[in-house]
Image: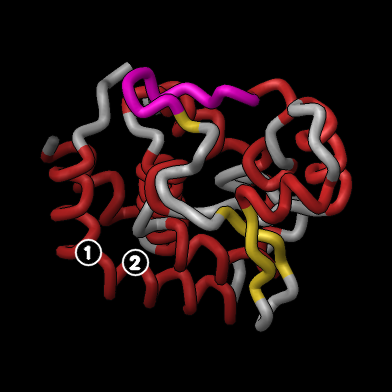
């Protein structure tokens, strides 16, 4: 597994942002029939090469949403009342009505090890991130448009999806391209 260099990743994202976002929009508007199957196949390939502990960019730059069960479970872990937990670490996003972290990086991230101090009881949003294998992928591609900026695994997933879809549309070009490598 290759260690993730966030500076290199950010430059790569900036260079390819527009093209990848356009690809996701086109795919969202005209999804291949086998999009969910492709998603699962690509997901397995992405995780073979991804070391989240060398990155933790999601925990450094984003906030999960906390549902009531998350708040109840985590506040109990700290022997806190739900109201105390919310006051200490969360705010209510008025637009989306989501409970979010008040600070970044996440208060539960150990920034020296990139490990979560509440990993076993982390929010469901964290446990599912980056949501690459949602069953109705077509309805979830808009989230990947946002996450490609923060998550190298999502970025790789979108690159691989684009490669697979384009090679399926133009098989001769894909064979020629592979032969040139």
Q: Is residue 13 above or below residue 119?
A: below
Secondary structure beneath label 2: helix
**Residue 16 tag number:** 1
Q: Is residue 168 visible?
A: no
Q: Is residue 42 left or right of residue 152?
A: right
Residue ID at (21%, 46%):
9
Residue located 48% across and 28% down the image: 47
**Is residue 144 in view from this perspective?**
yes
| x and y percentages locating residue 75 in the rendered image | 79, 37
Asked which secondary structure carries label 1, the reply is helix
The range drawn in magenta is: 110-118
Q: Is residue 114 magenta?
A: yes
16 sits left or right of 129 in the view? left
Task: Looking at the picture, tell me which residue is in the foreground, 51 or 167.
Answer: 51
User: Label 2, on which residue?
Assistant: 20
Quadrant of the image for the C terminus?
A: top left
Image point (18%, 37%), residue name: 179
Q: Dividing the image into 4 quarters, which one contains the N terminus?
A: top left
Neighbor class of circle 2 (other Cα within 10 Å; few <14, some 14-19, many 20+) is some
């Amino acid at each position: 597994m290759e260690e993730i260099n966030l500076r290199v990743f950010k430059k790569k994202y900036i260079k390819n942002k527009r093209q990848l976002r356009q690809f996701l929009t086109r795919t969202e508007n005209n999804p291949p029939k086998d999009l969910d199957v492709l998603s699962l196949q690509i997901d397995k390939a992405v995780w073979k090469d991804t070391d989240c502990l060398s990155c933790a960019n999601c925990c450094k730059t984003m906030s999960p949403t906390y549902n009531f069960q998350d708040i109840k479970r985590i506040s109990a872990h700290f022997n806190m009342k739900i109201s105390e937990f919310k006051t200490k670490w969360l705010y209510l996003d008025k637009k989306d009505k989501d409970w979010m972290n008040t600070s970044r990086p996440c208060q539960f991230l150990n920034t020296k090890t990139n490990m979560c101090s509440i990993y076993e009881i982390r929010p469901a949003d964290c446990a599912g991130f980056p949501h690459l294998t949602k069953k109705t992928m077509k309805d979830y591609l808009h989230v990947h448009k946002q996450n490609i900026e923060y998550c190298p695994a999502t970025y790789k997933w979108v690159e691989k999806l684009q490669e697979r879809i384009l090679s399926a549309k133009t098989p001769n070009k894909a064979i020629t391209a592979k032969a040139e490598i």
